[in-house]
Image (tube, rainbow, N blue to C red):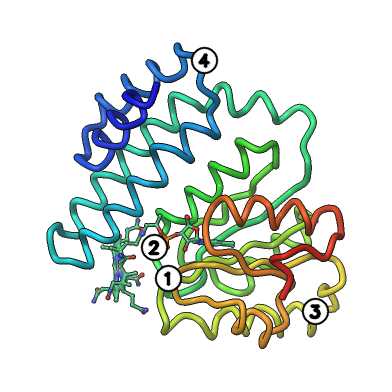
Amino acid sequence: MEKVFAELQEAIENGETQAAMDKTKDALKLGLRTDKIIQTAINPAFKDLGQKMFDGEIYVTDVLMASRAAHAAMYVMEPIISRFSGATKGIVAIGTVAGDLHDIGKNLVIMMLQGSGYTVIDLGIDVPVETFIDAVRTHKPDVLALSSLLTTTLPELDNLMEALVQQGLRSQVKVIVGGAPVTAEYAGRIKADAYANDLFEATEAVGDLVKNRIGKYAV
Ligand code: B12
C-alpha cells in the first residue's frame, strides 16, 4: 500500500499526468480513501517540491507541471469525492485575493474541503474585494476563505474585513485566512475568525467555524 503512495507522489513531483492518474486508480482499487491519498501522497509532494524550489534544485515550471499532475489525480477521485455533495456540511466561498495569481495551495484546500463534504464556491484568483462581498450576498456561505501567497497582497485581507463591516455583512459570515505569508497573529490583528496553516488544518478549522465552535484555529 505504501508503495502506491510513494509512486503517486513521485509521479506528481515529476509532473507525469498519466502516471499520476494511473497510480490514483491503483490506490482506489486497493480501497484507499481519497483523504488518505491526498494526505499521504499529494500533500507531501508539494512539501517536497517547495523545499527543492527553495534549495534551487527545481524551477517554477516544475511546480506547475506537478500541479497539473495533482489535478489529474484529483480528477480521478472527483466522482467519489462529489458523492458527499448530497448532504453538504456547509458552504465555503474561497478565492485568492486581488493581485495574487497563486492557486495551487488554494486548490488543494478546495479538494480537501470537497472531499470532506463541504460545498465549495471557487471564486478563482486575483479576486477583488467587491467579488468576495457579492459572493457573501449571493451565496450566503457559512465561511469565506481567503488565500494570499504574496506579502504585497496581505493588505487585501484587511481591506476585505473592513468592507464586510462597512457593508453590514460581518456577522453573517465567518472568515478564515491562509497562505504562506499569513500568520495567526496577522489574522488576529485584522479580526478574521480563524487561520490555518495547511489543507488539513483548514478543513478542521472550517468544521469549527461551521459549528460555531471556538476551536484551536480561532484567532
Ligand atoms: C508556484 C509558484 C508560483 C507560480 C504560481 C502558479 C499557480 N497556479 O499557483 C507562478 C509562476 C505563477 C508564480 C508567480 C509569482 N510568484 Co510565486 N511561487 C510559487 C512557489 C514556488 C510555490 C507556491 C505553491 O504553490 N506552493 C505549494 C502549495 C501547496 O503551498 P501553499 O501555496 O503555501 O498552500 C498551502 C498553505 O499555504 C495553505 N493555504 C493556502 N491558501 C489557503 C487559504 C486558506 C483559507 C487556508 C486556511 C489555508 C491556505 O494550505 C495550502 C495547502 O497545504 C512559491 C515558493 C514556495 N516554495 O512556496 C513562490 C512564491 C510564493 N512566489 C513568489 C513571488 C515573489 C512570485 C512573483 C511576484 C514572481 C515574479 N517576480 O514574477 C509572481 C507573482 C505573480 C502574482 N501576481 O501572483 C514569492 C512570494 C514572496 C512573498 N512572501 O511575497 C514565493 C514565496 C517565492 C520566493 N521565495 O520568493 N509563483
Mark drawn on residue 25: none
- Write down the residue under mark 2: 102
Q: Please, is residue 39 above or below residue 182 in the view?
A: above
Q: Earlier in the sequence, mark 1 or mark 3?
A: 1
Q: Secondary structure at mark 4?
A: loop
Say which of marks 2 and 4 sits in front: 4
User: Within 10 Å of the Cα at label 2, are there few (<14), some (14-19), or many (20+) other Cα atoms?
Assistant: some
Cβ of mark 1 under 8 Å from ligand 1: the answer is yes
Locate residue 204, reporting x and y percent.
68, 52
Residue type, numbered disc 3: Gln
Q: Earlier in the sequence, mark 4 or mark 3?
A: 4
Look at the numbered discs 4 and 3 and tell me whether their residues touch, using CB distance below 8 Å.
Answer: no
Cβ of mark 4 under 8 Å from ligand 1: the answer is no
Label 4 vs label 3: CA separation?
A: 48 Å
Quarter of the rendering occupied by the N terminus: top left
Q: Secondary structure at mark 2?
A: loop
Q: Place residue 205 in its image quadrant.
A: bottom right
Residue type, numbered disc 2: His
Q: Earlier in the sequence, mark 2 or mark 1?
A: 2
Q: Earlier in the sequence, mark 2 or mark 4?
A: 4
User: Within 10 Å of the Cα at label 4, are there few (<14), some (14-19), or many (20+) other Cα atoms?
Assistant: few
Residue type, numbered disc 1: Leu
Q: Nearer the viewer, residue 135 or 142?
A: 142
Cβ of mark 3 under 8 Å from ligand 1: the answer is no
Look at the numbered discs 2 and 1 and tell me whether their residues touch, using CB distance below 8 Å.
Answer: yes
Label 2 vs label 3: CA separation?
A: 28 Å
User: Left or right of 50: which side holds 184?
Assistant: right
Label 2 vs label 4: CA separation?
A: 33 Å
Mark drawn on residue 31: 4
- Write down the residue under mark 1: 149
